[in-house]
Amino acid sequence: MAKVNVEMLTEKSSELANDITSLQLANNPDLLKRYGAAGKRRCYKDAEYHLKYLIEALTMERPDMYANYILWASAMLKARHLTEKDLEDNLDVVQQSIHNIMGPQFSSVTKHYISAAKEKLKDQSDESQSCITENNPLKQEVTTYLEYLLQGKRHEATLFISELIDQGIEIKAIYQHIFQVSQYEVGRLWQLNKITVAHEHYCTAATQLIISGLYKHIYATNRKGKTLVACSISGELHELGIRMVSDFFEMDGWDTYYLGANIPDRQLIEALSEHKADVLALSVSLPIHVSKAATLIKTIRRNKNLSNLKIMVGGCPFLKNDNLWQNVAADAFAKNAQQAITKANELVTQ
């Protein structure tokens, strides 16, 4: 497949978003009647988002990245009273606008990505399926925990977790089957417009606070003499997942340095050298940041002081897109914290 000048598409993104909005409203005048001026602004914002994700997919040369984003967007927009046809029409308009503004050579490439997205929309996967599944050994416990949080009862949720620990439930099980699953479920509920952004932020902040109170339980006495540095890619604000990964490593006897979210690349590289890290665990939550991870890893590989460093990635884009971790030249990918420990121990013994 031919490549395109992604920078040129980025430079033209505002012009394209305006043109997409105009074409969408011209083709579907009922949209303006249904949603008014607010709907026009929403069309423009949607066009911007669709273009950002298309640009990222083109950068990584992965049509499936755009297709998976569109499938996610479909469920999100349906829950906000936009139809699948509205989204399909929008994809047609995106392609038309790119053809008009960027030219046929450019649009011949993007057509493949947009066609893959339209094909993906035929995937009738049930987005209403809860992340709290029957095979979760703590199904009832995570349900109770999440109910407390959604009701704004952080104190009760904290006491509930303390009671589970007193009952002998392992900290790792609480992390994996309660904290992680509840966060996935919160994201799904927001996607389906069943909770607000305020609910989502409250649940995340409450869980972070509860985790902070558990640190007295997680430090292992036997150390392995191996060091992990863990963080989210710069520009990311999501950090709870990678924080839980870091805690798992601490429980496994690693020396850990958790750097949180949105750390600049230069400071990260300095920290890797300073702490003589054996493994970097890098989290990416948003697909539009995958190419940033690829660039960072390339920069790290050029640093002679970090020639022995192993890099492991995780996060939603790598879960949704098969073998994407190889495209960013990581050494490994982990689906969850427990798998991260297994793979990291394998990497440092090779």
Image: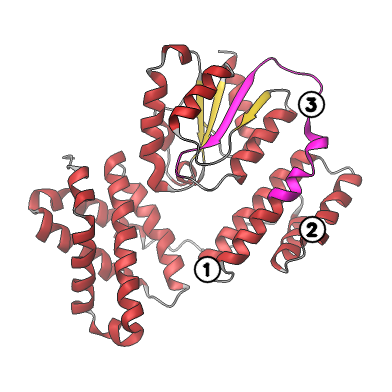
As drawn, 289 above or below 161: above
Mark 1 belongs to which amino acid?
Leu
Residue 220: mark: 3
As drawn, 89 above or below 231: below
Q: What residue is rendered at 44% in x and 64% in y?
A: 124
**Which quadrant holds the N terminus?**
top left
Is 114 displayed left or right of 301 in the figure? left
Q: Residues within 10 Å of mark 2 (few under 14, many from 20)?
A: many
The magenta-colored residue range is 208-235
User: Residue 151: x, y in percent?
Assistant: 73, 69
Q: Secondary structure at mark 3?
A: loop
As drawn, 7 above or below 345: below
Q: Nearer the viewer, mark 1 or mark 2?
A: 2
* Residue 54, magenta (yes or no): no
As drawn, 280 above or below 116: above
Q: Residues within 10 Å of mark 3 (few under 14, many from 20)?
A: some
C-alpha gap between disc 1 and disc 2: 24 Å
C-alpha gap between disc 3 and disc 2: 25 Å
**Which quadrant holds the C terminus?**
top right
Q: Nearer the viewer, residue 209 or 103?
A: 209
Q: Are marks 1 and 2 in contact (CB under 8 Å)?
A: no
Q: What residue is rendered at 36% in x and 63% in y?
A: 122
Residue 157: mark: 2
Residue 192: mark: 1
Q: Nearer the viewer, residue 111 or 119?
A: 111
Name the quadrant containing residue 26. Answer: bottom left
Is 125 displayed left or right of 152 in the figure? left
Q: Secondary structure at mark 1?
A: loop
Residue 76: mark: none
Mark 2 belongs to which amino acid?
Ala
Q: Nearer the viewer, mark 3 or mark 1?
A: 3
